Image (cartoon, grey):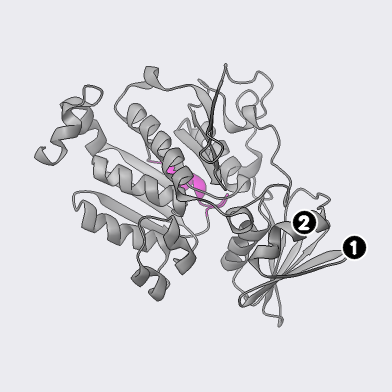
Amino acid sequence: MDRYSRQILFEGIGAEGQVRLRAARVLVVGCGALGSAQVEALARAGVGRLRVADRDFVEESNLQRQTMFSERDARERLPKAIACARRVAEINSDVTVEAEVLDVHQGNVERLIADCDLVLDGTDNFATRYLINDACVKHRVNWIYGAAVGSYGVMMAVRPHISPCLRCVFEETPPAASAPTCDTAGVVMPIISVVAAVQVSEALKLLTGHDELLHGSLMQFDVWQNEWRRIKLAAPAPDCPTCAHGRYDTLDAEAGDFAAVLCGRNAVQIAPRAVVAVNLPALAERLRAAGEVKVNDYLLRLRAGAYELTIFKDARAIIRGTDDVQTARTLYARYVGN
């Protein structure tokens, strides 16, 4: 216990809390900016078992804010989950890391959370967050939502059937292309540090049995505008389809986006489940910094490196330059968002 002596001295954790942390298993979904900060903090705190799930690989542009990764990881294009596991082995060899290199979807999310005490959100899209929410509410697993883009971030802890779930607070998934992403609006590292720090603080309270000290709010931060807001949350919504009615729509085999490899074209089509009208000129303005953009009344074309994305007014997209569905989903989430 010498390793954790300063943490044990902290009254909120103590020796008993440290033992609880050692026995805990936490799932981190997504190990980009938020996720890698969460993994590092949990590993240094002595959480015994970490399961890290991510579909992406390390790129040079990640290094500005994704603290677990090195230039070597980017050169080798290591899967982020593998790079996280290697880094944790250097930080704290007592922590066991299960690296899951996959796209979290309705077919595997329940397996991933099955034996976990807590789930942390390090994702970059609402589709996956609603999936986590449905699975965690169904299986009564606590989870902590978090998001950051530009200089703005938000987080809240979800305790199924005790506090509001994500669907209680955000009734509908934001339409595709309706909100900025890190690849269109950028992001500064301080907001990542703030959101991840509050997420991990709430995680430590839950894992050590101090549920009464949770802030019970939707927290909003803007480190550039110097704005910090706390919106107090009440009980779960009485008409919430997830909490109140036990409907877990995203876990349905037919839920989620539709992805199809276009034979012989080195391309994948992604079609979101909810058809929406995308404002193509507005999306074009957001994407101009990401690559060459051409837009007309019917579609938008973005050339970003080796890939070309053709985005239609109904939020459907064809991603050329790959026949890998996982890569196409990553690019869709990066540039279109959902």
Measuring 60% from the left and 41% from the top, which residue is drawn there? 130
The magenta-colored residue range is: 104-115
Q: Where is residue 1 in the image (x, y as percent from the top left)?
A: 11, 37
Can you tell which quarter of the image residue 16 is in?
top left
86 horizontally vs 66: left or right: left
Q: How far apart are labels 2 and 1 at the CA level? A: 14 Å
Q: Mark 2 points at which residue?
A: 315
- For badge 1, the amino acid type reads Asp
Q: Along the line of sight, which residue is nearer the eye, 248 or 7?
A: 7
Element type where label 1 sits in the image: loop
Which residue is rendered at x = 62% and y = 53% of the image?
185
Mark 2: few/some/many CA within 10 Å (<14, 14-19, 20+): many
**Mark on residue 284?**
none
Confirm or deny contact between disc 2 and disc 1 (CB under 8 A): no
> In the displayed structure, does residue 3 sit left or right of residue 162?
left
Q: Which mark is residue 297?
A: 1
